[in-house]
Amino acid sequence: MFQRDFPAADGGVDFASIPPHGRWRHLDAGKSRITPLMAKWDEGGSSVSEKEKCKRLIDLFLVSVLLDAGAGNQWSYNESGGESYSRSEGLAVATVHMFDQGLFSGSPAAQPHRVDAQGLSQINESRIATAMQVSDANPMVGLSGRTSLLVNLKTALESNPRFFGSDARPGNIIDFLESESKLDGSFLRVHVSSLWGVLLEGLAPIWPARHSIGGVQLGDVWPCSVLATVGQAEGDDFVPFHKLTGWITYSLIEPMEKILKWRFDGIEDMTGLPEYRNGGLLIDFGVLTLKPGLKALANTSGVPCLPPSHGAVVEWRAMTVIELDRIADGIRRQAGVNSCDLTLAQVLESATWKGGREIAKRLRPLTGGPPIEIESDGTVF
């Protein structure tokens, strides 16, 4: 066992200094990138409004999360200064540079720092591979799937002007959320369900066709055999995860709170993220145990390699959601605080996600990978 230390202040734990789990930390891996990027927008005497700054960050954060499904154990991204980053941080740093170069913008020369349907119409697998330094010597898992998400994002943006505006841009969800907000003194309050609804409905067209009910594609939703019963209604054995949508939600809240000073209600209703770091922590510490039959599916490193649809993966992810709530409650009881003092998003950031990475590196030092390798297509987790 090992213990993660929380930041201290005045002899106690400074919970307020723990940031929420969000893409911002990965984008700033190793050094600050978001603040210098924002500083560019006020150069030359052309001041950019706080609302437009936030829209640009929403643009960046959303595409960065969509590109964040597992990249595999071999891929890395090298910055010009020689720093090298892999996995989530590598993908994040790569997207900062792609965004800065105008790869997602329909007007890369005039306004590189935006994402819109016109810019996404120019996206293809070759351009993404080049921008992310993918090669035979630096292979990335799920490159095609990642590219398809961005290509499909163009369609989603154009199909939902109510959410994304006439110029088909992710950042325009700020205008929609503003219309859903309530004034509380000098602050705007927005319920997180409004943001969740925008992302779940607005991004629905981007996900690959898997399972559906009534002709509606469900996205990251999977049948779980242990829930199946005779005569049950269609979908009663399905478990909804929506990991990337949840990850986007956590990530987009932060810039709106920091820059626009908005306040989001209902965040406590969100679940933890069912992905391989949080879930890997549970297996590596023996909270969950793999069934013996899975050993026959092990790769050369002795780790089972399974598709997201495999029953063991569905059960693993479902138990991860449950156990993350239990872990958060246990930490709060031990610290004598409530969910307002220490949110689930803070637990994910400071304990389970980073803890999952640390124990994986100790147990599997050659790869640092999870105890179950996922056959990723770049569209799930």
Image: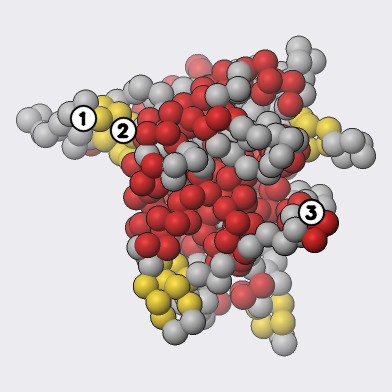
Q: Residue 303 at what x, y percent from top left?
A: 59, 26
- Is 381 drawn above or below residue 180 in the view shown? above
The reply to whether discs 3 and 1 touch (Cβ–Cβ < 8 Å) is no
Dot 3 or dot 1, earlier in sequence: 3
Label 2 secondary element:
loop
The amino acid pointed to by label 1 is Ile
| Image-quadrant location for residue 260 | bottom right
Q: 170 and 229: which one is in front?
A: 170
Q: Residue at x 66, y 77 (%)?
A: 14
Instruction: Report the disc number at residue 213.
Output: 1
Confirm whether residue 376 shows in the render: no
Q: Tell me whether the residue at label 1 lies in contact with that at label 2, contact meaning CB atoms closer than 8 angstroms.
A: yes
Quarter of the image with the N terminus is bottom right
Q: Is residue 309 above or below residue 60?
A: above
Q: Earlier in the sequence, mark 3 or mark 2?
A: 3
Q: Is residue 334 left or right of residue 234?
A: right
Q: CA distance from mark 3 to mark 1?
A: 47 Å
- Find residue 345 and report its horizontal and vertical position in percent: 52, 60
Q: Nearer the viewer, mark 3 or mark 1?
A: 3
Number of numbered callouts drawn: 3
Residue 83 visible, this orientation: yes
SS type, badge 3: helix
Q: Which mark is residue 40?
A: 3
Callout 1: SS:
strand
Query: What residue do we see at 45% from left, 73% from top?
Result: 188
Residue projecting furthest to the left? 231
Please state which amino acid type lies under the numbered disc 2. Answer: Leu
Q: Quadrant of residue 350?
A: bottom right
